[in-house]
Amino acid sequence: MEQLTRGLLLVLLFPCCLTQTTASNTTSATPTSSPQPRTDRLKVRLTGFPRKHNEGRVELFHKGEWGTICDDDFSIVNAHVLCRQLGFVEATGWTHSAKYGKGSGKIWLDNVLCSGSEKSIEQCKSRGWGNSDCTHDEDAGVVCKDERIPGFVDSNVIDAHVDENKIEEVRLQPVVVAAKKKLPITEGVVEVKYKDGWAQVCDLGWTIKNTRVLCGMLGFPHERKVNKNFYKRQKRRAAEKVPKPKVNVSAGGRLFLERQKSYFHVHSVACTGTEVHLAACPLEFSKPNSTSTCVGGSPAVISCMPGPLFMQNSSLKKKLKISTNVRLKGGARLGEGRVEVLKDSEWGTVCDDRWNLPSASVVCRELGFGSAKEAFTGARMGQGMGPIYMNEVKCVGHEKSIWSCPFRNITSEDCQHMEDAAVRCNIPYMGLENKIRITGGRTQNEGRVEVLSADPNGTLSWGLICGEGWSTKEAMVACRQLGLGYANQGLQETWYWDSSNVTDMVMSGVKCTGSELSLSQCQHHKTISCQKAAAKFSAGVICSETVSDLVLNASLVQQTVYIEDRPLHMLYCAAEEDCLSKSAAKANWPYGHRRLLRFSSQIHNIGRADFKPKAGRHSWVWHACHAHYHSMDIFTHYDLLNANGTKVAEGHKASFCLEDTDCHEGVSKRYECANFGDQGITVGCWDLYRHDIDCQWIDITDVKPGNYIMQVVINPNQEVAESDFTNNAMKCNCKYDGHRIWLHNCHIGDAFSEEAERRFEKYPGQLNNKIS
Ligand SMILES: *[C@@H]1O[C@H](CO)[C@@H](O)[C@H](O)[C@H]1NC(C)=O
Ligand SMILES: *[C@@H]1O[C@H](CO)[C@@H](O)[C@H](O)[C@H]1NC(C)=O
Ligand SMILES: *[C@@H]1O[C@H](CO)[C@@H](O)[C@H](O)[C@H]1NC(C)=O
Ligand SMILES: *[C@@H]1O[C@H](CO)[C@@H](O)[C@H](O)[C@H]1NC(C)=O
Ligand SMILES: *[C@@H]1O[C@H](CO)[C@@H](O)[C@H](O)[C@H]1NC(C)=O
Ligand SMILES: *[C@@H]1O[C@H](CO)[C@@H](O)[C@H](O)[C@H]1NC(C)=O
Ligand SMILES: *[C@@H]1O[C@H](CO)[C@@H](O)[C@H](O)[C@H]1NC(C)=O
Ligand SMILES: *[C@@H]1O[C@H](CO)[C@@H](O)[C@H](O)[C@H]1NC(C)=O
Ligand SMILES: *[C@@H]1O[C@H](CO)[C@@H](O)[C@H](O)[C@H]1NC(C)=O
């Protein structure tokens, strides 16, 4: 019998290696505990079979070698110490007599006697390292309570530095020739990458649960059954060894078994289906190229169902649904972001206590992605603004939605937005980044955009894009396709960059909505039409991992609104700055007044980079009247709209002097207006425009009583890049009886469900009728 190397199986959800600094200097054979700290951390892992992420044979990494613990004198107290060391709150049991299979190599510890307060097993009394009279028949195991120690470092990130047989990657080799060209590849022979290269997996005992785990890793939410007959045919041919050379029936456009020679390395895979990585499943490694490990079996072949975003077949695409009460916000790439959930028609966030990969995977899959690659805590994808709905989410992994998982309702003391949970999901490989490149820039993150296109003869070549109409939105798509995050800027002229190797212009009139995955999904001219076709007028981008995100505090607007009849003699400065509606020009200055709807604006930067005006300070405009510089010509729009969306109070475009009025705890102010200071809004800070400052109003002198929608839009021309433009508008229902004004339902643009937003929009019309 072939000797097997036991599956080493880093426990991915829960790293094998501790991050606490605990060990003492008593690494010698002294059976006493010692409190002296040592900088090395003892690595501990759970392994064996059949086991779960929270139970298994205990192995310790000492002197470069993994070894076991003998069960003599073992106790639940020892198990508590080990479980805590692994990041679990406590042990619920322990096992003896190699319940999870026999280990190999050293038996590192024997007669272990912990008192319970030790931080690491090596601080407990024992016979000392390597001193044991046991055999591997006596290997000890532990069962830990499936509850993580809050904040246990790195408990949710797949550990990168583990075993010699670590599975680094998985891929599918399509069996049908034509399928190679169509991305994503959804069906094929499974191959896993480990230190010696790629290997196949033996399908003996294979279940659809294994398929589910692999599909998740490959970016697909669901698994499919494969057409067995199709592969049986393949197998028979292989077995008969008939056409030993590659079966390349490409004439019929059909099959070829690229790999006649099977090279198994992994077998006995037994996933439960909830694992987020194959390496978290029980499985075994065999020696490379051993032949006896897959007798009667074949290379595992799987088939996956892509999410709608990645589905090529449009008729199938329509049938696929993704969750409408969960979304991701603020992520730089597709399939990542802050988790937001919909409750009572309003979006809110999830608190990160116990946030882990199984829960994150449920979110990923319900959004049409694969399993989660990472589960982030501590608002790594920016802070939300609205309610926080869930805490201590504990999904098993097979739930259809995060809403089906156990969780705790939240109170304001429990959590703050600093603890917003986020995910990075596995997404299928689409190869989109191979069809775009940037050239000429000063760094790898900027340059002229070039796309790969085919001429009528089918020859592929690179070409530039016409700069006309190229804006932040198009640049966002280009940077996303390049895999470089967000666009910091979209450039219409790129003459200042190196132009020694420029290509021809091949595309013009590109118009994107901003959410596309590649430029080919955007509209563009059928035949190129560019006024200035020289390379220096070609489209360029500056990409960035992080950008700002501005959001208005809607409840503050609602709380601070009032009407003021302001005498004209106090409004000269405002008139000069265009803060009054046109009819003011015909007024009998300085007699009379203007009726102003006043409110406070508090603009928060909840993004991941400071918000800074696009224009350099040399082009800021001095406003003598208010005695400060305006760094952005149009920073906000203030409008009052009627039922059909028509502006009833003339849109007032406000420019401001941007600064940090105040910041969250621990963040320091960086920008201030006074004395020609630097302008901007720091991440975690806000800029406050109090209701009583000049121009902080809408001039409603000409507005009749009725019901309206009040709307404030920040950065309306999307002049400065933000990670999210859907939250730039703030809207309120507004009721004006000719004397007083009320605002209600104030909310930012992306805070409501679609249905609630439709109800909201209807409001003015319905009530208008009642009033008039
Ligand atoms: C513990 O070990 C470290 C590193 O080997 C050494 O620097 C330190 O002096 C030792 N402490 C004691 C108390 O022996
Ligand atoms: C087999 O198929 C591949 C891929 O389509 C093709 O490149 C190759 O020329 C074919 N070989 C034969 C012998 O037909
Ligand atoms: C295993 O087989 C493959 C393919 O035949 C070969 O390239 C590789 O060198 C072999 N590995 C070992 C360790 O023999
Ligand atoms: C799309 O899927 C439908 C339903 O499975 C199938 O009938 C159709 O042939 C597919 N179309 C393409 C182009 O693959
Ligand atoms: C959480 O709150 C909802 C209502 O908002 C209630 O239906 C549910 O029972 C609560 N759950 C718990 C665990 O308190
Ligand atoms: C296509 O190929 C023909 C023949 O090789 C050539 O004359 C023609 O210029 C090519 N067209 C393009 C657009 O490259
Ligand atoms: C331009 O192309 C030439 C030849 O391919 C290459 O040697 C040179 O480095 C390129 N210059 C730049 C700036 O990329
Ligand atoms: C928004 O304004 C309200 C009312 O003044 C205040 O209670 C709340 O803390 C503000 N929100 C944030 C995120 O600052
Ligand atoms: C919108 O409403 C206003 C008055 O309420 C009306 O004058 C205007 O014609 C309407 N516009 C459209 C496009 O319906």
Image (spheres, rainbow, N blue to C red):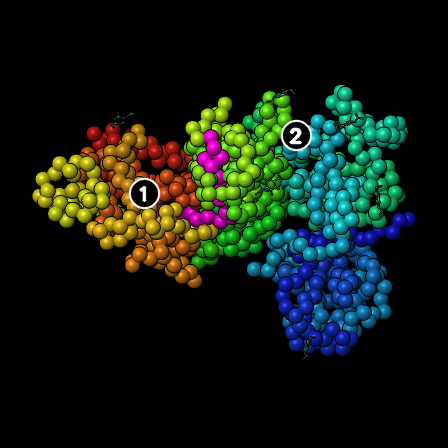
| Distance (Cα) linking label 2 and label 1 | 46 Å
Indicate whether 89 appears above or below 129. Answer: above
Task: Tell me where residue 738 appears, x and y as whole percent.
Answer: 17, 38
Indicate whether 724 appears above or below 225. Answer: below
Which residue corresponds to the image point at 60% horizontal and 30% vertical from the top-left?
A: 461
**Considering the image in quadrants, where does the C terminus appear?**
top left
Task: Tell me where residue 237 appears, x and y as whole percent.
Answer: 85, 28
Q: Which residue is disc 1 drawn over? A: 634
Magenta span: 533-553
Q: Earlier in the sequence, mark 2 or mark 1?
A: 2
Viewer-nearest of labels 2 and 1? 1
Q: Which residue is disc 2 drawn over? A: 182
In terms of image quadrants, where is residue 271?
Answer: top right
Secondary structure under badge 2?
A: loop
User: What's the residue type where badge 2 is placed?
Assistant: Lys
User: What's the residue type where badge 1 is placed?
Assistant: Ile
User: Does the magenta run of residues contain 171?
Assistant: no
Secondary structure under badge 1?
A: loop
Q: Is residue 423 left or right of residue 128?
A: left
